[in-house]
Amino acid sequence: MHRLRPLLAPCLALCTIAPLIERAQADAVSDFYRGKTVTIIVGYTAGGGYDLYARALGRHMGRHLPGNPNFIVQNITGAGSLNAANHLYNVSAKDGTVFGTFGRGLPMEPLIGTAKVQFDAIRFTWLGSGANEISFCATWHTSPVKTWADMLKTPFTAGGERSSAARSMAAAAGRGRASSRHGEHGSPRRSSISWCTSPIRRRRSSRISR
């Protein structure tokens, strides 16, 4: 046992120091956030899905951060939440007191979108997701696009509100183009994408109808 004592002493010292370092780090974070207000920037209008998720998060997240800061929501609308992303990247404080939520496809905007992008998407830090969304792509029964392979070789049109919307990205992945015109179910080359925020549960009595 005496041969192990020289080895155990440094280990015990490290085990003692590690909790002290963690406690000091936690105290530093707590001191920073105590009495501060954290702003959640939302790229859409009040009452929408993104806004509701942000307000629900802001109501509870303060209790889980050291220092228990207050939370407020700021809506910066326009351009499919592009204005909010640009503001977050160029104007907002970079000290941990501001974070935002914007269109899930917006990081793709610099690749397939417009020149109004004023951010480098890879420099955003992803914190988490408020929902588990399942996307699917569907075409009208008269469309020649029946499979993914068809989409890669057959020109088609997909409805979408901006270039980085899910519908538009699906079009960009194949030979499609995005259009803001909706509801043309009779168009032989039209397709669309939809999504849900909760897993779909199969029920015996459920029916799918057009």
Image: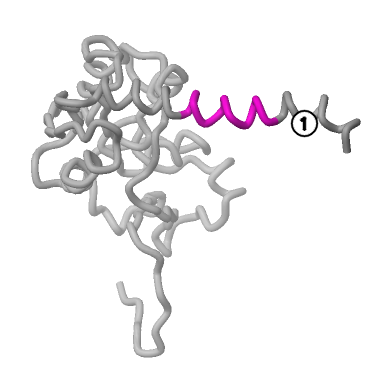
What's the residue at 20%, 21% (across, down)?
83
Image quadrant holding the C terminus, namely bottom left
Q: Which residues are magenta?
A: 12-22
Percent x, y of residue 167: 37, 43
What's the residue at 26%, 22% (across, down)?
31
- Residues 53 and 4: in front is 4
**Eyeballing the image, is 64 above or below 112?**
below
Residue placed farthest to the bottom in the image? 205
User: From the viewer's perspective, is 11 left or right of 5?
Assistant: left
For disc 1, the neighbor class at 10 Å (few under 14, some 14 to 19, many from 20) is few
Percent x, y of residue 4: 86, 33
**Eyeballing the image, is 64 above or below 186?**
above
**Eyeballing the image, is 194 above or below 3?**
below
- Residues 21 and 183: in front is 21
Residue placed farthest to the right in the image? 3
Res. 75 image quadrant: top left
**Residue on which the image places disc 1:** 8
